[in-house]
Amino acid sequence: NGYMAENFDSEYHAQLTRARDGGFWVAGVNRVRQWDGQKWVKDFGPFPWGDSFVTTMLEAANHRVLVGTLLSGLYVVDEAGGTYHLSRTNGLPQDWIRCLVEDREHNIWVGTSGGLVLLRERKVAMLSPPDNWEGRPVMGITRAHDGAVWAATEGAGVYRLDGEAWTHFGVSAGLSNLF
């Protein structure tokens, strides 16, 4: 098929998967790179998952590369090299990703040690203030006429999101009851 052999004996490569535009995506040497058969054509830089072992990879139809790990969950790398991380802290039942497959509707099925997860592409923004609601649940929300979003919590006071800026209203802002 016109592929040249290159000696990779001194490099450790944990996983590979086919690239949709030819060649392979390779996870190894602390990087995710695309090999076209003769040279590296893309390099997403150092692993964001540190030294966690890569268990599986998949390039989806949207050209995102999904990388499953043994202890760090699932990483989704976009064409610009940006990453999104899914783990037990934000929806996965387990951080050990065993397998990945894309169905004909472009849903991603993720097999974990704790069960099966279905990922569907949608536009969702997970919003959280810098103090992560002080670990308290959000009990009510409303949108003001100026577009700001207000959120009342169970024990952490009230939060206001105005575009990208968060304001926290607690005891120092005059609230006598944080519930």
Image: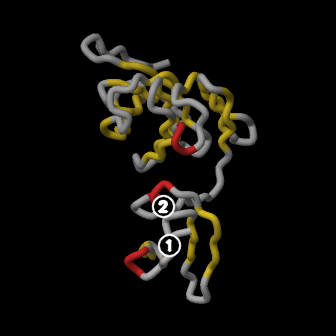
Q: Residue at x 51, y 35 (%)?
A: 74
Query: Helix, strand or loop at disc 1?
Result: strand
Whether residue 60 sits left or right of residue 167 in the image: it is: right
The one of 35 and 132 positioned closer to us in this rendering: 132
Residue type highlighted by circle 2:
Trp
Question: According to the image, what is the colour scheme of the structure?
Answer: secondary structure
128 lies above or below 38:
below
Residue type highlighted by circle 1:
Tyr
Give residue 133's mark. Answer: 2
106 lies above or below 97:
below
Q: Residue at x 52, y 63 (%)?
A: 155
Between the C-alphas of marks 1 and 2, the distance is: 8 Å
Q: Residues within 10 Å of mark 1 (few under 14, many from 20)?
A: many
**Image x and y of residue 154, in percent:** 57, 63
Q: Quadrant of the C terminus?
A: bottom right
Q: Are marks 1 and 2 in contact (CB under 8 Å)?
A: yes
Query: Helix, strand or loop at disc 2?
Result: helix
154 lies above or below 118:
below
Q: Residues within 10 Å of mark 2 (few under 14, many from 20)?
A: many
Which residue, as the protein is rendered here, is positioned at the far bottom? 145
In the picture of the structure, the residue carrying the numbered disc 1 is 159
Mark 1 or mark 2, earlier in chain? 2
**Image x and y of residue 79, in percent:** 46, 47
Whether residue 81 sits left or right of residue 138 in the image: it is: left
**Image x and y of residue 134, in percent:** 45, 58
Residue 148: quarter of image:
bottom right
